[in-house]
Image: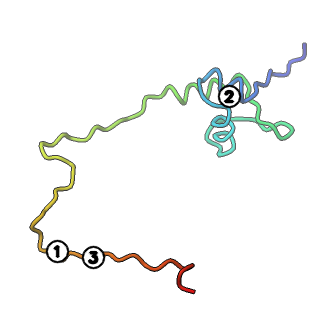
């Protein structure tokens, strides 16, 4: 066999990564993952696949917010000084004419 590398289809890469083929093609189109465009189709070499896996293995830095004793829900103030606005529906356009 010749010295050309085997090119993998997006479906093969997606199955190996546990993702959808659409995601793999979209990320390649956006330039977020290394890929090769051959004859209008996306293809991936073994080296590119390893780069994708290595990028996915980098631990993500997750910052957990500090827990507070207060609830994050907005309080309801029944005795607020804000004026109460009564909403009235508009007449539908088909009934105006």
Tell which of 80 and 64 is nearer to you: 80
- Above or below, 21 relative to 30: above
Q: Is residue 87 left or right of residue 53?
A: left
- Which one is earlier in the sequence, the residue at label 2 or at label 3? 2
Which residue is disc 2 drawn over?
48
Question: In the figure, 22 relative to 2: above or below?
Answer: below
Relative to 14, say whether 31 is above or below: below
Q: Nearer the viewer, residue 81 or 33?
A: 81
Toward the top, the furthest residue is 1
Q: In which quarter of the image is the C terminus?
A: bottom right
Circle 3/circle 1 CB separation < 8 Å: no
Q: Distance between the residues labelled 2 and 3?
A: 62 Å
Kind of element beneath mark 1: loop
Q: Which residue is drawn at 63% across and 31% down?
A: 20
Pointer 3 residue:
86
Foreground disc of the pair 2, 3: 3
- In the rendered image, the quadrant that contains the N terminus is top right
Q: Which residue is drawn at 64% across and 20% down?
A: 16
Q: Name the side, left or right, on which 53 lies relative to 13.
A: left
Q: In the image, 15: left or right of 66?
A: right
Q: Which residue is drawn at 72% across and 30% down?
A: 10
Q: Nearer the viewer, residue 97 or 90?
A: 97
Give the CA separation, mark 2 to mark 1. 61 Å
Q: Distance between the residues labelled 3 and 1?
A: 13 Å
Q: Which mark is residue 82?
A: 1
Residue occupying the far left of the picture: 79
Task: Please name the residue shown 61% across and 28% down the image.
Answer: 51
Tags 2 and 1 in contact by the CB under 8 Å rule? no
Q: Position of residue 52 (x, y in %)?
A: 61, 29
Q: In which quarter of the image is residue 24?
A: top right
In this rendered view, identify the residue nearer to me: 96 or 40: 96
Instruction: Mark 2: give few (<14), some (14-19) or many (20+) Cα within 10 Å.
Output: some
């Amino acid at each position: 066999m010749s010295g050309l590398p085997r090119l993998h289809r997006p479906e093969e890469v997606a199955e190996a990564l546990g993702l959808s083929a659409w995601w793999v093609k979209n990320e390649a189109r956006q330039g977020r993952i290394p890929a090769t465009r051959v004859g209008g189709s996306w293809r991936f070499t073994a080296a590119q696949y390893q780069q994708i896996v290595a990028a996915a293995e980098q631990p993500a830095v997750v910052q957990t917010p500090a827990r507070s004793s207060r609830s994050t829900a907005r309080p309801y103030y029944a005795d607020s000084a804000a004026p109460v606005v009564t909403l009235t529906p508009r007449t539908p356009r088909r009934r105006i004419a």
